[in-house]
Amino acid sequence: MAEKPLKLREVLEVFYPAERWLILKKLRAEAIKLLEALESFNIKGFVHGSVARGDVDEDSDVDVVILQPIPSHVVETCLLVKGFNIFSRVLTQATPSNTPKAHIYLDSREKISVTFPLLSFRTRELEFYKFGGMIGLNELKEDLRVPGCTKRLTFIKPTAYGHLEYPIEGFESEVARELGVSVDVVKERVRVLKRRDEHGRTGLFIKRLLAEGDNFESVFEEIVSKNPPARRRLRF
């Protein structure tokens, strides 16, 4: 049997200038403040994306996720008591089979947010966060960075001076091993992100801006009562 040709991997070495380290330090300080606030109410959160990996820029977001359902009034009370301002609240559901999520934005530009599920995440959905890189409060305080993937379909591996970067496509199995996720999740993210790059971001199945006085749980119940496809996620 003929041998298959080897697929060579082009690895890019990226060295961070002092300015980039300062941006990372500032964003991580915001993340630590937010995670400490949540932890004071016994809520465990994680920061995910570029702040977890380290490959930040001036436009990077501080995205915090809580991995289990928490009553929304508890999360909101925690944030307000700890001095955060809530600028907007948005309920989303990507597709009828995806878990509905609550998003609380803590600044007018929607650059700092807390997200949590209204139902328990499925295993694959949890792996999506690991795919992008996810880190907890203790690791942040220890100044650790974790590997993860970008929306440009590149894998980021932190180094002392910056990071190593290489394409995901063709190396899905290796990326999955590095991140501790299934190969199927890596392949699915590649498909989704390539489609988004080619056709633009498609609309969410549900995206609802909450009015003052609304709460996430009641709004989702209202949506489910009027929108039969939204009930699909309740069955599993």
Image: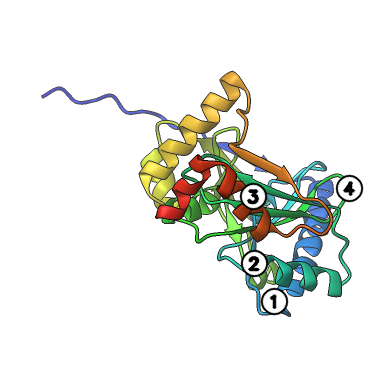
- Label 2 CA crowd tier, 10 Å (few <14, some 14–19, many 20+): many
**3 vs 134, nearest the viewer:** 134
Q: Earlier in the sequence, mark 4 or mark 3?
A: 3
**2 vs 211, nearest the viewer:** 211
Q: Which residue is mark 2?
A: 45
For this orientation, the residue located farthest to the left is 1
Assign the N terminus to one quadrant of the image.
top left
CB under 8 Å between discs 4 and 2: no
Give the Cα separation between the discs numbered 1 and 4: 24 Å
Amino acid found under the numbered disc labelled 1: Glu
CB under 8 Å between discs 3 and 1: no
Q: Position of residue 55 (x, y in %)?
A: 69, 46
- Dot 1 lies on which element? helix
For image coordinates 40% across by 39% down, the residue present is 172
Q: Earlier in the sequence, mark 3 or mark 1?
A: 1
For image coordinates 54% across by 34% down, the residue present is 153
- Dot 3 lies on which element? loop
Q: Mark 1 or mark 4: which is in front?
A: 4
Q: Which residue is mark 3?
A: 49
